[in-house]
Amino acid sequence: MSSTDALGTALLVRARNAIAAEFGQSPHPEPDHPALHAPGATFVTLTQQGQLRGCIGSLEAWRTLDQDVRSNARAAAFKDPRFAPLRQDELSHTRVEVSLLAAAMPLSFTSEEDAVAQLRPNVDGVILEFERHRGTFLPQVWESLPEPRLFMAHLKQKAGLSPGFWSPDVKLFRYEVQKWKEPEKA
């Protein structure tokens, strides 16, 4: 098993254990990995039959990777405002995915067209900031929004702006992820 696969397994087990612990379930053995003790930023995505059931994460590494993945797993299961808290009877058919974020890098652009032209579908996660508005899409969102203009329009909406909004004061950052998914649940 490669170091990357070992890290993915360690993260997935910790994410599932963090959720299961809220229901009083016994944890699965957790393999160790040196990266778990260093700062890290993750997103935990929960799906049921391919449909989103929760997604919460960190855009910056400010706590250990171990702490981050556990906290985001619990938040995705119980605190995503788009969904009711996960019920115990749902856990067995909920699939966990963990995305480990690389540091975000600012994007330099002269216009919205220039910014959109620089986006790399299926590679870039994107953070949009404007005044008090902020939103992000993981690179996985390209699977459902493969056209860069549409991706950007939906990202603006997620940040609380209109899809046609633009200002020279918009800030964009891009990041890449490593991601791991549990096998499909029945």
Image: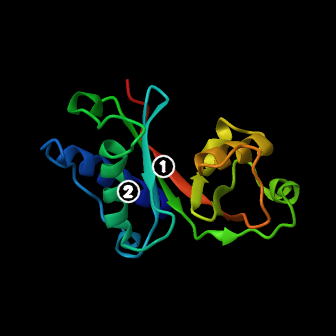
On residue 131, which mark appears? none
Residue shown at 23% from the left, 28% from the top: 89
Q: Quadrant of residue 91?
A: top left
Residue under the image location 75 percent in, 50 percent down: 165
Report the Cα–Cα distance between label 2 and label 1.
8 Å
Quadrant of the image containing the N terminus: bottom left
Sort mark 2 into few (<14), some (14-19) or many (20+) by Cα contacts within 10 Å: many
Label 1 neighbourhood size at 10 Å, few (<14), some (14-19), many (20+)?
A: some
Quadrant containing the C terminus is top left
Residue tagged 1: 180
Q: Nearer the viewer, residue 145 or 2?
A: 145
Residue under circle 2?
A: 11
Residue 78 in view, yes or no: yes
In the rendered structure, which disc, 2 or 1, sits on the residue that comes first in sequence? 2
Vertical position of residue 101 compared to residue 152: above or below: below
The residue sitting at 65% across, 57% down in the picture is 126
Q: Position of residue 114 (x, y in %)?
A: 87, 59
SS class of the residue under badge 1? strand
One can see residue 175 in this view:
no
